[in-house]
Image (spheres, rainbow, N blue to C red):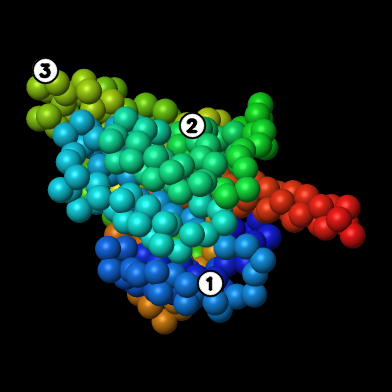
Amino acid sequence: MRQAGLSVAGGIDLDASCKFAYEENVKATFVADDMRDVTRQHVEALFERKAHDYRVLVGCAPCAPFSFYTGRYRKAKKSDPKWSLLDEFLRLALETRPDVISMENVPRVVLSDVFASFVKGLSDDGYHVTYRKVRAVHFGVPQRRSRLVLFASRFGEIHLGPPTHPRTVRTVRDAIGHLPALVAGVPSAHDRLHVTRGLGPRNLARLQATAEGGSWREWDQALQLDCHKRPGGMSFRSVYGRMTWDEPSPVITTQCLGIGNGRFGHPDQDRAISIREAALLQSFPADFALVSPEEPVNGLRLARQIGNAVPVSLARAIGRAVKKHLSDVSMTASAGRSARE
């Protein structure tokens, strides 16, 4: 949002560990709180800290209940605490009545009743609601990530605009090919976030038996896990896989530092991707400060922050669409005043 030229008043998230990275890089107030406990007064207090012509409320309910990877969208119910957080976002939107609202989630959220209720609630309150599925690679993210982007405005429809990278997509090589080589478990001397998990002898042998872009299906049976040998094992196509240099990466998840959780092996080095590489594949700036210099590096916590983030290049495109829309609204209002005068 800042890169798009918007003035950011503050952010709210349940994960208190985000505080340093948010305030250090975004230069705005961070509030660690559960959305179910956030009131209209909390949000309005944040808005009041910034001079503004318009108010914009941006949110993203947790994706897990609606995700293809968990399959929970088929059986989740409104009693699920995470499922109901989209209702909480609607509540805050209707209580604070911002000029513009934006929401990002997995495309499968549209299959849920809670999404239909979200759209209806905004429409009934006078918002013009638009949403579409987009591919993050078309907006400069070196990753195969499809997302649903929703806008709602009191002034008219907002559209994301044409892709910024319609034909030439960024690849794994573009994002991380310049970084120095690593040994699993040994941090870089130049960047302590360029560090990976260590590997035991068996997992090291598994990666050594995997070609660029390959997976466990290339291994001898002696290296395969029991789950791979079962009838349904072929469905685990990407676990223990390596990325491909000249293609976008797979979706960067909160589990992206483990080779057993997806295609998170480095294309040719015998290790998983590092924390810094995961951030770059999410299109974070190379100098983005994820942890205080005084703090130890906690890989699990940082992977959670990175995997839960909206890819920065996509978020910037969303912010630019909002800024253009509000600029057009201001110009129309100004022209109207001039005509009346």
Sort mark 1 into few (<14), some (14-19) or many (20+) by Cα contacts within 10 Å.
some
Q: Nearer the viewer, residue 9 or 334?
A: 334
Is 80 positioned to the left or the right of 273 in the image? left
Q: Residue under circle 3?
A: 231
How many angstroms separate mark 2 from mark 3 (CA)?
34 Å
Q: Position of residue 168 (x, y in %)?
A: 66, 30
Q: In the rendering, which numbered label is found on residue 133?
A: 2
Report the amino acid beneath label 2: Lys
**Nearest to N terminus: mark 2 or mark 3:** 2
Instruction: State whether residue 140 is above or below residue 58.
Output: above
Give percent across and percent down for residue 243. 43, 35
Q: Is residue 184 above or below residue 294?
A: above
Quick one: label 1 or label 3, which is nearer the N terminus? Answer: 1
Query: Which is more N-terminal, label 1 or label 2?
Result: 1
Identified by mark 3, the residue type is Pro
Instruction: Tell me the tag on residue 47.
Output: 1
Residue 229 visible, this orientation: yes
Say what secondary structure mark 3 lies in.
helix
Residue 205 placement, left or right of 213: left
Q: Quadrant of residue 114?
A: top left
Report the disc number at residue 142.
Answer: none
